[in-house]
Image: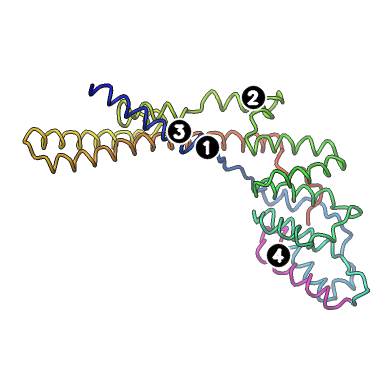
Amino acid sequence: MMRNSFLTLILLCLSATSCSKHEELTPSISYTPPHHVVHQMASGFAPLTDSEVQSDWGRELLIGSTLAQEQDFYQAILALKRARILQKHHTGPRTPIPRQDQVAYDMCLAYMLSSKYDVITHAFETGKLDAITPESPVFTSALIILYDAYLHQKNPAKAQEIYDVIENQSKPKAAQLKAYKNIFTLDKEGLLSDPKTEVLYTSYSARKKHPMTAGALNAVLPGSGYVYVGQIQSGVTSLMLNALFIAATYQFATHHQVAPAIISFGFEMGWYVGGIHGAYLAAEEYNNTLYSAHANEYLRKEKLFPIFQIEYGF
């Protein structure tokens, strides 16, 4: 009877763990290009004229673009914001604003390289990027930045809308971005449909740990689930604590000290159940780290990060 009750408890713990938190990876995929990569990217705009450099907004634009090339994005964005304000201040209501698309694009790229994706999507949705029209040389590059921003914002519907426009502009770039998206979102079907990315997924699958297995191992022998995912110290600590509370409960019970035995047993059950859930989460953390490492290395090696698809810099 006691054995059946124990098995029932294990099954209930594992069921609760798997139902409350299905295995869902949240990989950390990012890439900060070296200084020379950004510096060597050609501008999509003609150099500022002497008269433009002498203007207030022209000087701010020059400063902002130069600082952005040096990857001082905070100061660059401030300078570009000042340039945008001065442009509007020195331009009449019916006079076209000079280099408005350049200021908007440089700010957009600076925000991307500083990982401020929410600012990019907000700027687009509030019309601050409207100056970058299809006629602008940086139009496709701006769309790629926006597409990446919506992926980071976990807005697949908006990202797909932008992707459709990019595909009409450049199918090769769209193909690269599709592979990037499949890796970024861990789209199993999409990864397996491409022979190149299939290798990435199968390599990850061969080495990943199964959270349910980690939880089950910890249920059978406290600490073994942590050892399964490589957390030896946590496994030893879990085993010792559970053994300590079990021994204390046994001692209290054999000496007919009911209240201390109940308290000790309560602590033990907390550690026991918590250990099962903790091992489950540890396996998910292991998988996140493993996949992130594989994905970042593959994307960098194959030049699939959006920054490699962007044609123009500052």
- x, y percent for residue 74: 65, 64
Mark 2 and mark 1 lie on one chain; the one further toward the N terminus is: 2
Secondary structure, mark 4, is helix
In the rendered image, which quarter contains the C terminus? Answer: bottom right
Left or right: where does residue 214 sit relative to residue 65?
Answer: left
Q: Residue furthest front?
A: 1
Mark 1 and mark 4 lie on one chain; the one further toward the N terminus is: 4
The amino acid type of the residue labelled 2 equals Val
Residue 88 colored magenta? Answer: yes
Q: In terms of image quadrants, where is residue 283?
A: top left
Residue 128 position (above or below residue 156): below
Disc 3 from disc 1: Cα separation = 17 Å
The amino acid type of the residue labelled 1 equals Asn
Mark 3 and mark 1 lie on one chain; the one further toward the N terminus is: 3
The residue where tag 3 is placed is 18
Q: Residues within 10 Å of mark 3 (few under 14, many from 20)?
A: some
Q: Residue furthest left?
A: 255
The amino acid type of the residue labelled 4 equals Ala
The residues colored magenta run 68-91
Residue 197 colored magenta? Answer: no
Q: Residues within 10 Å of mark 4 (few under 14, many from 20)?
A: many
The residue where tag 1 is placed is 288
Secondary structure, mark 2, is helix
The amino acid type of the residue labelled 3 equals Ser
The dot on residue 199 is 2
**Foreground pick, 200 / 154:** 154
**Foreground pick, 82 / 69:** 82
Residue at left offset 80%, top offset 63%? 103
The residue where tag 4 is placed is 76
